Amino acid sequence: MNPLTYAEENYLKAIYHLSEGGKKGVSTNDISGEMKTKPASVSDMLRKLGDKAVIEYRKYYGVHITEAGKKLALQTIRKHRLWEVFLVEKLKFSWDEVHEVADELEHIKSRILIQRLDEYLGFPKFDPHGDPIPDEYGDVRSRPRLPLNELDLHATGQIVAVKDSSAAFLRYLDKVGAYIGARIKITDMVEFDGSIEILVDNKKSIFMSKDVAGNILVMQ
Amino acid sequence: MNPLTYAEENYLKAIYHLSEGGKKGVSTNDISGEMKTKPASVSDMLRKLGDKAVIEYRKYYGVHITEAGKKLALQTIRKHRLWEVFLVEKLKFSWDEVHEVADELEHIKSRILIQRLDEYLGFPKFDPHGDPIPDEYGDVRSRPRLPLNELDLHATGQIVAVKDSSAAFLRYLDKVGAYIGARIKITDMVEFDGSIEILVDNKKSIFMSKDVAGNILVMQ
DNA sequence: ATTATTTTTTAGTATAACCTAAATTTCTAT
DNA sequence: ATAGAAATTTAGGTTATACTAAAAAATAAT
């Protein structure tokens, strides 16, 4: 079948992300929400993606991504994350500025470009938000990780990723001094609301709400 | 007015290039040839570009690019050439591989991206083919240059650009050892067909047809 | 179990960018 | 100066992507 269009790639990526975790079908409404298009437009697109066999589409029952679709989605994600690394490491973007630009760059088609970029960046395994970069074949080597709010008091770990990578959240983390790679220890927990205090790199103490902690992923 | 679409940017760039030199209007057919679309499609597009005031369009008489249009075209050209430098200098593309990729990259919208890329590359003034890179404001500082076939016997100069930047021509230049920056001297001329022999960097002798020489631009 | 609500799809419309075929305008050659 | 050729535009159609409004299906509530 023909290569996917930009719009098709974007929908497929959204469907892939929405599929992660649960194996239930992804609903038209969810996709509509993610893509900021109307459900009617989504229905249109699902028919097309179904025709191209990258999703399984049963009307009224949501969609499942196929193996072929997953491969393609992971290619796009690979490109997105490699470009993010480039923007942060080489062009000195901050990690909250890279999303929109990478959303455009991820659609550049050249295979050799991505190979050379990967090489140029030193074959990075994780993007600036700690998310794993799939390899050329779509294999993802993800680290075991869990939300910071699920750690016990006095537990230690290392920040490896963020769940929410909105600019607002990332700028907040910058402000308080949390970053990917930081070694942390839970120094206090408030029973009442689940907020915690952590010690970063044995130096700096940060107090944060449960909500914030839930969006920080750590490796123990 | 709204930003230009990809297609509009591409047409405008083509019109700009076709305008260079002569100040006569650019014909529908010329644009059609350059863009590899049908004349009817060009007419469509010219109406749109006229509406957006980036060209002056008088039906049946070809188009002139406006000042606003020139600015926009130069922005696109700037982006194209900066990306070419990136591909060659950083990703080790050869100069005959960069065109198609840069044709995609040039449409990425972020202004800050281009500023940072420019800085990262050390504010280059010329692309890998020797063409000048316009600055942020669309100013081009071009070097005086003339086709190699117009030099006199025993004249010296330096290769600064190529007129034809097709992959075939560039690979030919690689093969014979001609490159941007090379210091050359005309060592022989054949009256009959205008072919010449040049000495490159006082080391290597190259024999070339008038046609080839006409596509190599030198600074004296 | 039947109605009400929500979700999803269909039908019909719009815009961008392309096409072919036909009409029109301009150019050229006598 | 005018006929024929060449260039250009218009008319009408296609595909991709989105939209709104209406219809249909699935789910939830009594």
Image: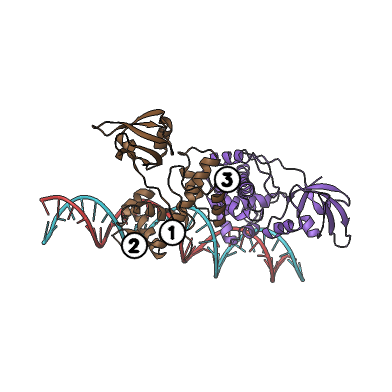
Chain colours: A purple, B brown, C red, D cyan
- Counting every numbered tag in the picture gives 3
Residue B153 showing in the rendered view: yes
Coordinates of residue A215 in the picture (x, y in percent):
75, 55
Q: Is residue B192 left or right of residue A55?
A: left
Write down the residue under mark 1.
B71
Q: Do labels 3 and 2 share a chain?
A: no
Write down the residue under mark 3.
A53
The amino acid type found where label 2 is placed reads Tyr
For the residue labelled by badge 3, is the local secondary structure a helix, a strand or a loop?
Answer: loop
Coordinates of residue B177 in the picture (x, y in percent):
42, 31
For the residue labelled by badge 2, is the local secondary structure a helix, a strand or a loop?
Answer: strand
Subunit of mark 2?
Answer: B
Q: Which of marks 1 and 3 is in front?
A: 1
Alpha carbon separation for disc pair 3 and 2: 45 Å
The amino acid type found where label 1 is placed reads Lys
Write down the residue under mark 2.
B57
Q: Do the residues labelled 1 and 3 touch (CB within 8 Å)?
A: no
Give neighbour class at mark 1: few <14, some 14-19, many 20+ (Cα, 10 Å).
some
In the picture, residue B213 is in which quadrant? top left
Q: Earlier in the sequence, mark 1 or mark 2?
A: 2
**Residue A18 vs residue A46, the one in the foreground:** A18
